[in-house]
Protein backbone atom coordinates (compact mmCIF):
# COMPACT_ATOMS: atom_id res chain seq x y z
CA UNK A 1 0.00 0.00 0.00
CA UNK A 2 1.23 3.47 -0.90
CA UNK A 3 0.63 6.59 1.18
CA UNK A 4 1.89 10.17 1.05
CA UNK A 5 2.74 12.48 3.91
CA UNK A 6 1.63 15.87 2.64
CA UNK A 7 1.15 19.44 3.79
CA UNK A 8 2.11 22.37 1.60
CA UNK A 9 3.06 24.31 4.70
CA UNK A 10 6.81 24.10 5.36
CA UNK A 11 8.37 22.72 8.51
CA UNK A 12 5.33 20.94 9.98
CA UNK A 13 7.11 17.60 10.48
CA UNK A 14 6.53 15.78 7.18
CA UNK A 15 10.09 14.54 6.76
CA UNK A 16 10.55 13.78 10.47
CA UNK A 17 7.35 11.74 10.35
CA UNK A 18 8.30 9.80 7.22
CA UNK A 19 11.75 8.99 8.63
CA UNK A 20 10.58 7.90 12.07
CA UNK A 21 7.28 6.34 11.15
CA UNK A 22 8.97 4.44 8.33
CA UNK A 23 11.80 3.17 10.49
CA UNK A 24 9.48 2.08 13.32
CA UNK A 25 7.15 0.34 10.88
CA UNK A 26 10.17 -1.55 9.58
CA UNK A 27 11.04 -2.65 13.14
CA UNK A 28 7.48 -3.99 13.35
CA UNK A 29 8.37 -6.44 10.57
CA UNK A 30 6.93 -4.45 7.70
CA UNK A 31 8.97 -4.09 4.56
CA UNK A 32 9.03 -0.36 3.88
CA UNK A 33 10.09 1.76 0.93
CA UNK A 34 10.53 5.48 1.56
CA UNK A 35 10.27 7.71 -1.51
CA UNK A 36 11.98 11.08 -1.13
CA UNK A 37 9.96 13.33 -3.43
CA UNK A 38 11.43 16.57 -2.08
CA UNK A 39 14.33 18.32 -3.88
CA UNK A 40 15.59 19.41 -0.43
CA UNK A 41 16.59 15.72 -0.10
CA UNK A 42 16.62 15.70 3.70
CA UNK A 43 15.61 12.05 3.92
CA UNK A 44 18.21 11.10 1.37
CA UNK A 45 20.91 12.78 3.48
CA UNK A 46 19.73 10.79 6.50
CA UNK A 47 19.20 7.39 4.94
CA UNK A 48 21.43 6.96 1.90
CA UNK A 49 24.65 5.21 2.86
CA UNK A 50 27.80 7.34 2.61
CA UNK A 51 29.44 5.23 -0.11
CA UNK A 52 26.51 5.95 -2.38
CA UNK A 53 26.26 9.69 -1.77
CA UNK A 54 28.78 10.55 -4.51
CA UNK A 55 26.84 8.74 -7.19
CA UNK A 56 23.39 7.20 -7.09
CA UNK A 57 20.22 6.95 -9.16
CA UNK A 58 17.39 9.15 -7.89
CA UNK A 59 13.68 9.69 -8.29
CA UNK A 60 14.63 12.40 -10.79
CA UNK A 61 16.11 9.76 -13.13
CA UNK A 62 12.96 7.68 -12.71
CA UNK A 63 10.54 10.54 -13.41
CA UNK A 64 12.44 12.33 -16.15
CA UNK A 65 14.72 9.76 -17.81
CA UNK A 66 12.39 6.73 -17.47
CA UNK A 67 14.99 4.83 -15.45
CA UNK A 68 13.69 1.46 -14.20
CA UNK A 69 12.40 2.13 -10.66
CA UNK A 70 14.25 -0.87 -9.22
CA UNK A 71 17.56 0.67 -10.27
CA UNK A 72 16.95 3.64 -7.97
CA UNK A 73 16.02 1.70 -4.82
CA UNK A 74 18.67 1.15 -2.17
CA UNK A 75 18.76 -0.72 1.13
CA UNK A 76 19.46 1.42 4.20
CA UNK A 77 21.38 0.56 7.38
CA UNK A 78 18.01 -0.43 8.91
CA UNK A 79 16.62 -3.90 8.16
CA UNK A 80 13.42 -3.89 6.09
CA UNK A 81 13.83 -0.19 5.23
CA UNK A 82 14.56 0.83 1.64
CA UNK A 83 15.01 4.24 0.04
CA UNK A 84 14.21 5.73 -3.34
CA UNK A 85 16.37 8.85 -2.97
CA UNK A 86 15.93 12.41 -4.19
CA UNK A 87 18.52 14.76 -5.62
CA UNK A 88 18.82 18.49 -6.12
CA UNK A 89 18.06 18.04 -9.83
CA UNK A 90 14.50 17.28 -8.79
CA UNK A 91 14.04 21.04 -8.27
CA UNK A 92 13.78 21.37 -12.05
CA UNK A 93 11.57 18.32 -12.55
CA UNK A 94 8.23 20.10 -12.31
CA UNK A 95 9.09 22.25 -15.30
CA UNK A 96 10.48 19.27 -17.24
CA UNK A 97 7.43 17.14 -16.47
CA UNK A 98 4.96 19.69 -17.85
CA UNK A 99 5.55 18.61 -21.44
CA UNK A 100 5.25 14.88 -20.68
CA UNK A 101 2.20 12.82 -21.59
CA UNK A 102 -0.07 12.18 -18.61
CA UNK A 103 2.30 14.13 -16.42
CA UNK A 104 0.30 13.58 -13.20
CA UNK A 105 0.65 9.79 -13.49
CA UNK A 106 4.39 9.43 -13.94
CA UNK A 107 5.17 8.47 -10.34
CA UNK A 108 2.18 6.14 -10.13
CA UNK A 109 3.37 4.23 -13.19
CA UNK A 110 6.90 4.06 -11.80
CA UNK A 111 5.75 2.75 -8.41
CA UNK A 112 3.21 0.29 -9.87
CA UNK A 113 6.13 -1.87 -10.95
CA UNK A 114 7.46 -2.32 -7.40
CA UNK A 115 4.51 -1.76 -5.05
CA UNK A 116 3.97 -5.48 -4.50
CA UNK A 117 7.53 -5.90 -3.24
CA UNK A 118 6.73 -3.88 -0.08
CA UNK A 119 4.16 -3.82 2.70
CA UNK A 120 4.10 -0.01 2.63
CA UNK A 121 5.52 2.67 0.36
CA UNK A 122 5.71 6.08 2.08
CA UNK A 123 6.16 9.25 0.03
CA UNK A 124 7.67 12.41 1.55
CA UNK A 125 6.16 15.36 -0.36
CA UNK A 126 7.73 18.80 -0.80
CA UNK A 127 6.13 21.86 0.83
CA UNK A 128 3.97 22.85 -2.16
CA UNK A 129 0.90 21.70 -4.05
CA UNK A 130 2.77 21.58 -7.36
CA UNK A 131 3.15 18.76 -9.85
CA UNK A 132 5.46 16.68 -7.63
CA UNK A 133 2.93 16.63 -4.79
CA UNK A 134 0.10 15.90 -7.26
CA UNK A 135 2.17 12.96 -8.56
CA UNK A 136 2.54 11.79 -4.95
CA UNK A 137 -1.22 12.00 -4.38
CA UNK A 138 -2.09 10.27 -7.65
CA UNK A 139 0.25 7.40 -6.73
CA UNK A 140 -1.23 7.04 -3.21
CA UNK A 141 -4.15 5.22 -1.71
CA UNK A 142 -4.07 7.44 1.39
CA UNK A 143 -2.70 10.79 2.38
CA UNK A 144 -1.51 11.48 5.93
CA UNK A 145 -1.46 15.13 6.95
CA UNK A 146 0.87 16.30 9.70
CA UNK A 147 -0.43 19.40 11.48
CA UNK A 148 1.82 21.43 13.74
CA UNK A 149 0.16 22.31 17.06
CA UNK A 150 0.83 26.02 16.70
CA UNK A 151 -1.04 29.17 15.83
CA UNK A 152 -2.34 29.18 12.21
CA UNK A 153 -2.28 25.35 12.22
CA UNK A 154 -5.48 25.13 10.19
CA UNK A 155 -4.45 27.80 7.73
CA UNK A 156 -3.94 26.35 4.27
CA UNK A 157 -5.65 23.06 5.10
CA UNK A 158 -8.67 24.07 3.01
CA UNK A 159 -6.41 24.42 0.00
CA UNK A 160 -4.84 21.03 0.73
CA UNK A 161 -8.27 19.40 1.04
CA UNK A 162 -9.33 21.04 -2.26
CA UNK A 163 -6.26 19.54 -3.92
CA UNK A 164 -7.01 16.08 -2.48
CA UNK A 165 -10.62 16.42 -3.73
CA UNK A 166 -9.45 17.57 -7.16
CA UNK A 167 -7.11 14.57 -7.41
CA UNK A 168 -9.85 12.19 -6.27
CA UNK A 169 -12.38 13.56 -8.76
CA UNK A 170 -10.06 13.70 -11.75
CA UNK A 171 -7.03 11.49 -11.34
CA UNK A 172 -7.28 8.92 -8.53
CA UNK A 173 -10.76 8.02 -7.35
CA UNK A 174 -9.50 5.87 -4.47
CA UNK A 175 -7.51 8.64 -2.75
CA UNK A 176 -8.63 9.28 0.81
CA UNK A 177 -7.37 11.16 3.87
CA UNK A 178 -5.91 8.26 5.85
CA UNK A 179 -5.12 10.24 8.97
CA UNK A 180 -3.94 13.43 10.58
CA UNK A 181 -0.81 13.52 12.75
CA UNK A 182 -0.57 16.18 15.45
CA UNK A 183 3.08 17.25 15.62
CA UNK A 184 5.23 19.43 17.89
CA UNK A 185 2.66 19.24 20.66
CA UNK A 186 3.70 21.07 23.80
CA UNK A 187 1.65 19.75 26.71
CA UNK A 188 2.60 22.76 28.85
CA UNK A 189 0.78 25.24 26.65
CA UNK A 190 -2.93 25.89 26.30
CA UNK A 191 -2.30 26.81 22.68
CA UNK A 192 -1.21 23.25 21.81
CA UNK A 193 -4.27 21.85 23.62
CA UNK A 194 -6.61 24.28 21.84
CA UNK A 195 -5.11 23.59 18.43
CA UNK A 196 -5.28 19.81 18.99
CA UNK A 197 -8.96 20.13 19.94
CA UNK A 198 -9.72 22.31 16.94
CA UNK A 199 -7.96 19.89 14.56
CA UNK A 200 -9.83 16.92 16.09
CA UNK A 201 -13.13 18.75 15.51
CA UNK A 202 -12.19 19.70 11.97
CA UNK A 203 -10.98 16.21 10.96
CA UNK A 204 -13.51 14.19 12.95
CA UNK A 205 -12.28 10.65 13.50
CA UNK A 206 -9.19 11.06 11.35
CA UNK A 207 -6.65 12.29 13.92
CA UNK A 208 -4.33 9.61 15.30
CA UNK A 209 -4.36 9.10 19.09
CA UNK A 210 -0.56 9.14 19.15
CA UNK A 211 0.45 12.79 19.35
CA UNK A 212 4.04 13.75 18.53
CA UNK A 213 5.50 15.97 21.26
CA UNK A 214 7.83 18.88 20.64
CA UNK A 215 11.10 17.14 21.48
CA UNK A 216 14.68 18.34 21.34
CA UNK A 217 15.78 14.75 20.64
CA UNK A 218 13.60 14.63 17.53
CA UNK A 219 15.13 17.85 16.22
CA UNK A 220 18.70 16.72 17.04
CA UNK A 221 18.52 13.30 15.39
CA UNK A 222 18.69 14.54 11.75
CA UNK A 223 21.90 16.48 12.45
CA UNK A 224 23.52 13.10 13.19
CA UNK A 225 21.74 11.56 10.19
CA UNK A 226 19.91 9.19 12.52
CA UNK A 227 16.35 8.09 13.12
CA UNK A 228 14.97 8.62 16.62
CA UNK A 229 15.01 4.83 16.99
CA UNK A 230 18.80 4.94 16.66
CA UNK A 231 19.49 8.29 18.34
CA UNK A 232 17.28 8.31 21.44
CA UNK A 233 15.10 5.20 21.55
CA UNK A 234 13.95 5.94 25.13
CA UNK A 235 12.82 9.52 24.48
CA UNK A 236 9.23 10.73 24.43
CA UNK A 237 9.47 11.42 20.68
CA UNK A 238 10.61 7.86 20.03
CA UNK A 239 7.72 6.46 22.04
CA UNK A 240 5.27 8.67 20.15
CA UNK A 241 6.50 7.54 16.72
CA UNK A 242 6.57 3.93 17.85
CA UNK A 243 2.94 4.21 18.95
CA UNK A 244 2.05 5.99 15.72
CA UNK A 245 3.68 3.20 13.69
CA UNK A 246 1.49 0.66 15.49
CA UNK A 247 -1.58 2.82 14.95
CA UNK A 248 -0.90 3.30 11.24
CA UNK A 249 -0.39 -0.44 10.73
CA UNK A 250 -3.55 -1.23 12.70
CA UNK A 251 -5.60 1.34 10.82
CA UNK A 252 -4.40 0.31 7.38
CA UNK A 253 -4.19 -3.42 7.95
CA UNK A 254 -7.07 -3.69 10.42
CA UNK A 255 -5.04 -5.81 12.85
CA UNK A 256 -3.72 -5.25 16.34
CA UNK A 257 0.04 -5.30 16.74
CA UNK A 258 1.38 -7.05 19.83
CA UNK A 259 4.43 -4.98 20.62
CA UNK A 260 4.44 -2.41 23.40
CA UNK A 261 7.45 -0.40 24.55
CA UNK A 262 8.31 0.61 28.10
CA UNK A 263 7.16 4.03 29.22
CA UNK A 264 9.91 6.49 28.71
CA UNK A 265 10.97 10.04 29.66
CA UNK A 266 13.24 12.46 27.80
P1 LIG B 1 9.63 20.98 4.76
O1 LIG B 1 8.28 21.55 4.49
O2 LIG B 1 10.72 21.99 4.68
O3 LIG B 1 9.90 19.73 3.98
P2 LIG B 1 8.84 19.29 6.94
O4 LIG B 1 7.37 19.50 6.99
O5 LIG B 1 9.34 18.08 6.28
O6 LIG B 1 9.58 20.58 6.33
P3 LIG B 1 10.58 18.63 9.12
O7 LIG B 1 11.78 18.83 8.27
O8 LIG B 1 10.21 17.26 9.49
O9 LIG B 1 9.33 19.36 8.45
O10 LIG B 1 10.67 19.48 10.47
C1 LIG B 1 10.99 20.85 10.44
C2 LIG B 1 11.97 21.15 11.57
O11 LIG B 1 11.36 20.88 12.81
C3 LIG B 1 13.21 20.27 11.51
O12 LIG B 1 14.31 21.02 11.95
C4 LIG B 1 12.90 19.15 12.49
O13 LIG B 1 14.07 18.59 13.05
C5 LIG B 1 12.06 19.86 13.52
N1 LIG B 1 11.05 18.99 14.12
C6 LIG B 1 10.20 18.16 13.48
N2 LIG B 1 9.40 17.54 14.35
C7 LIG B 1 9.74 17.98 15.59
C8 LIG B 1 9.27 17.72 16.92
N3 LIG B 1 8.26 16.89 17.15
N4 LIG B 1 9.86 18.38 17.93
C9 LIG B 1 10.86 19.25 17.70
N5 LIG B 1 11.35 19.53 16.49
C10 LIG B 1 10.81 18.92 15.44
MG1 LIG C 1 10.41 17.88 4.49
Image (tube, rainbow, N blue to C red):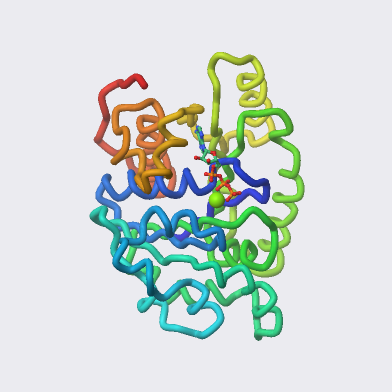
Residue 109 placement, left or right of 164: left
Q: How many marks?
A: 0
Using the image, determine if residue 26 lies above or below residue 105: above
Residue 113, how many percent across, how many down?
Answer: 41, 77
At x 63%, y 48%, the residue is 7
At x 48%, y 54%, the residue is 42
2 or 68, nearer to the observer? 68
> Looking at the rendering, which quadrant does residue 102 occupy?
bottom right
Residue 170, how many percent across, how many down?
Answer: 71, 68
31 or 36, nearer to the observer? 36
At x 36%, y 56%, the residue is 47
Using the image, determine if residue 129 lies above or below residue 89: above
Residue 79, how many percent across, how many down?
Answer: 23, 55
Indicate the quadrant containing the C terminus: top left, top right, bottom left or bottom right. Answer: top left
Furthest residue toward front: 54
> Looking at the rendering, which quadrant does residue 69 occupy?
bottom left
> Looking at the rendering, which quadrant does residue 53 occupy?
bottom left
Indicate the quadrant containing the N terminus: top left, top right, bottom left or bottom right. Answer: bottom left
58 or 259, nearer to the observer? 58
Residue 194, how many percent across, how many down?
Answer: 66, 20
At x 50%, y 59%, the residue is 41
Amino acid sequence: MIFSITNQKGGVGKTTSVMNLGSYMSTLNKKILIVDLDPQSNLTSGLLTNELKEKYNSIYNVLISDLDTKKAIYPTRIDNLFLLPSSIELAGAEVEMVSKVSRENILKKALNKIVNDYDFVIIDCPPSLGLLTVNGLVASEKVLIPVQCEYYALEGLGQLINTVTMVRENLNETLDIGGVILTMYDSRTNLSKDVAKEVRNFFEGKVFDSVIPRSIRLSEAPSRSLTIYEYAPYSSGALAYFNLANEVINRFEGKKSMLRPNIIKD
